Image (cartoon, rainbow, N blue to C red):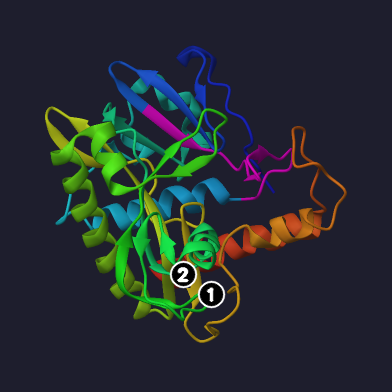
Amino acid sequence: MTILRETNFETLGAPRKGKVRDIYELDGKLLIVATDRLSAFDVVLPTGIEDKGKVLTRLSLFWFDQVKDIIPNHIIETNVDKYPASLKQYSESLRDRSMLVKKAKVLPVECVVRGYLAGSGWAEYQQSGTVCGIKLPGGLKESSRLEKPIFTPSTKAEEGHDLNISFEEAVRIIGDDYARHLKDSSIAIYEKARGLAETRGIIVADTKFEFGVIEGDVVLIDEVLTPDSSRFWSIKDYAPGKPQDSYDKQIVRDYLNTLDWGKTYPGPELPPEIAKKASERYKEIYAILTGEKI
């Protein structure tokens, strides 16, 4: 079993490290590597999840291809055998978990689309009957399907948490033209993905997209419709009025909630059986959606 928690490609210089991805500058391009790191409650855990980075990368590539008629993306190459010669010595570490992409100016609004009432949306609805300021009909239950998908942008708070904002606030941050473009594109991508997923027995409850600008064009970047950016539920098991079982790291969150842990760094090690189940959950949704196995 090989788990990649860190990359150390010495000839490429130090990467920028996110919670999951390591990003290297490469001759005006970016090399994005999805590691097997897992974060919960905004803390990166010391235990890696086998093949998680491969699932995130390959599933993103699947969706980038599915929605390329709606919006372009930043990908240059994903086949490591066609990467520049400077990367050849790292081929096996990069295979199936990396993307060589164009640099984009990131638009600092995260684009969340909700087709169902869950998570922070459900919490707000219980308080005020709204989600990100959007008024919804009364009498909805937890996990209810919404009449139409709604666009509920967010931005990063200083401490790193996502902060829900209104569409008007998104306009203030990135301007009216970009905000409308991102809203229309996000809903179009979500609706196409939801339709395809439903044919495979999966509900896309909600998801988050990121966009950037390359030479004046808005493009889809980062990851797309993965278990880290989306809630996937089984149609067969769907029962509104309660939380649903998600194809993601929920098993890890549930385990951590049984511990006396302050949800601050450093996080606890995961027992092997919990890490294994999380890995299987990630690979299961990949197989269901794409028809392929990792």
Q: Is residue 224 above or below residue 264?
A: below
Residue shown at 60%/65% (left/top)? Answer: 281
State the SS at label 2.
Answer: loop
Q: Was residue 215 drawn as part of the magenta stretch in this picture?
A: no
Crowdedness of circle 2 by 10 Å Cα count: few (<14), some, many (20+)?
many
**C-alpha distance separating marks 2 and 1:** 6 Å
Q: Position of residue 282 (x, y in %)?
A: 56, 60
Q: Nearer the viewer, residue 126 or 42?
A: 126
Q: Is residue 72 visible?
A: no
Specify whether 137 is left or right of 125.
left
Q: Was residue 49 drawn as part of the magenta stretch in this picture?
A: yes
Q: Amino acid at mark 2?
A: Leu
Specify whether 80 is left or right of 190.
right
Q: Position of residue 80 (x, y in %)?
A: 38, 37
The mark total stands at 2
- Residue corresponding to mark 1: 142
State the image quarter where residue 225 is shown: bottom left
State the SS at label 1.
Answer: loop
Q: Is residue 40 above or below residue 86?
A: below
Specify whether 190 is left or right of 178.
right
Q: Is residue 90 above or below residue 115?
A: above
Q: Which secondary structure dominates the residues rendered in magenta?
A: loop
Q: Position of residue 89 (x, y in %)?
A: 48, 24
The residue stretch that appears in magenta: 31-50
Crowdedness of circle 1 by 10 Å Cα count: few (<14), some, many (20+)?
many
Circle on res. 117: 2
Q: Amino acid at mark 1?
A: Glu
Q: Position of residue 248 (x, y in %)?
A: 57, 60
Q: Is residue 13 visible?
A: yes
Asked if marks 2 and 1 touch (Cβ < 8 Å), the reply is yes
Residue shown at 75%/42% (left/top)? Answer: 263
Circle on res. 124: none
